[in-house]
Amino acid sequence: MRSEDDLVLTMRAAAGQAGLPADLASGVAGRRRARRTRKRLGAAVAAAAVVAVAGGTTAVTTAQEREVAPAVISPATEVWPEAVMKVPADRLPMTALSAREVLTYRNKRFEVYDAATGGTRVLGQVPADPVRVAVGARHLAWAGQDRALWIMPREGGEARRVGRATADVYELAVTDGFLAWSGERSGVHRLPLAGGTPELMPGAENLRLASWPWAHEWDAAGNVTRIVNLEAGASTGVAVPPGAERWQCGTEWCTGLLDDRLIVQRVDGSARRTLPPMLMGYGVWWLLDDRHALFRVYEPDVHKAGVPLAAVYDLATGELAGVGERTPGVEGGDVGRIQDFPLLFWDAGARFYQHCADRACEIRTRGGGEEYTVLDPGAIRG
């Protein structure tokens, strides 16, 4: 069985085409080592009843077989057309800046692609390869491989080095006044945009940055137990069900595993429901934003056509839509995602095939290469 690190490799070919550092092109792995380290996802969690991994590895159920046949899942392009855009495949989509604009990266520069007009606006050159990127109201920010912290005006301009983090940056945010980040260990740090010395934010020593201004506190089992607003200082306890695993939350909704099944509920424990057994967790961190999650789709018939690579589920409304399409005869394939940005992308023209060599097999793609279909969950109405 391939590890979560192998999920990162699934996006490296596309990353190379756009000149994007492999560490930034974390694909579907989401929070990657930061999540794995802080949640202590060792052998015990890896052997949980539902494990979904990419690149052609079979999704495994260890506690019970899934006997319920999947229902037909309509494509996201039909369910949420208002949230779908097309972006040329010679760049990597990172996150949506508006209903029609996408922040992209290629050839060591940030660009904005206008999906309505097809125009491209160059924001500026990136002097240090980014390993973490953040988007604020007025600035773009990134951490380099040497832990250097940089900013650039959101409307474009020259990059400026602000300072240096004391440890590797795993989560990053930029406000109008400072940068905020978390590293491998708990604690949220900040540094003024004008420069200076990094400092631990008051009361944030046991927290990890989620998306500004929100931070999380975790228990030893890897569940989110408290949500903190770092601007207001407000704190909300999370009603984690006994026995839950991989419990993850936005500001209102949570999802995780309970008795080997995916469940959804509000932060306070109300409105709980169990999701259909055809849905499985996608990687380690499948929550995309406050109310949307990315799941694997269990379909035992590997030759069946029209099976999506994954499905996006609206935790508030229960609406479900497929993204991408599995190639009949091949069990595997991935949906692109950069870091923790909610935006998803896939090449609808590509087809998957299995390549085996040296007693090892992997899923590769052929064809496509013209454009990405992009889904912005933040633009979903309802």
Image: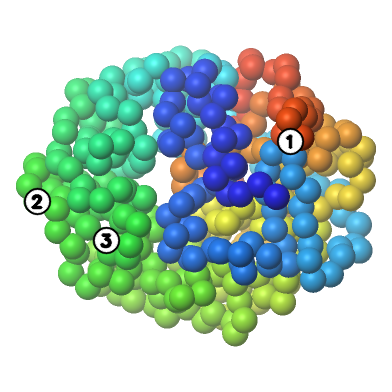
Instruction: Classify mark 2: helix, strand or loop.
Output: loop
Residue 275: x and y, percent?
A: 74, 66
Q: Is residue 325 above or below residue 44?
A: above
Q: Number of callouts in the render?
A: 3
Q: Is residue 117 above or below residue 212?
A: above
- Crowd tier of the residue under label 3, counting other residues whose Cα lies within 10 Å: few below 14, some 14–19, many 20 or above: many
Q: Judge by depth and name the residue closer to the eye, 367 or 113.
A: 367
What residue is shown with label 1?
Answer: 360
Q: Is residue 187 above or below residue 26?
A: below
Instruction: Classify mark 3: helix, strand or loop.
Output: strand
Whether residues under marks 3 and 2 lie with C-beta atoms below 8 angstroms apart, the answer is: no
- Crowd tier of the residue under label 2, counting other residues whose Cα lies within 10 Å: few below 14, some 14–19, many 20 or above: few
Task: Describe residue 29's horizontal placement relative to residue 313 as left or right.
Answer: left
Image quarter (top left, top right, bottom left or bottom right) of the C terminus: bottom right
Q: Residue at x 73, y 19 (%)?
A: 366
Instruction: Classify mark 1: helix, strand or loop.
Output: strand
Q: Residue at x 35, y 20 (%)?
A: 108
What residue is shown with label 3?
Answer: 188
Q: Judge by depth and name the residue closer to the eye, 246 or 152.
A: 246
Q: What kind of residue is marked 1?
A: Ala
Q: Residue at x 25, y 69 (%)?
A: 204
> Which numbered dot is residue 197?
2
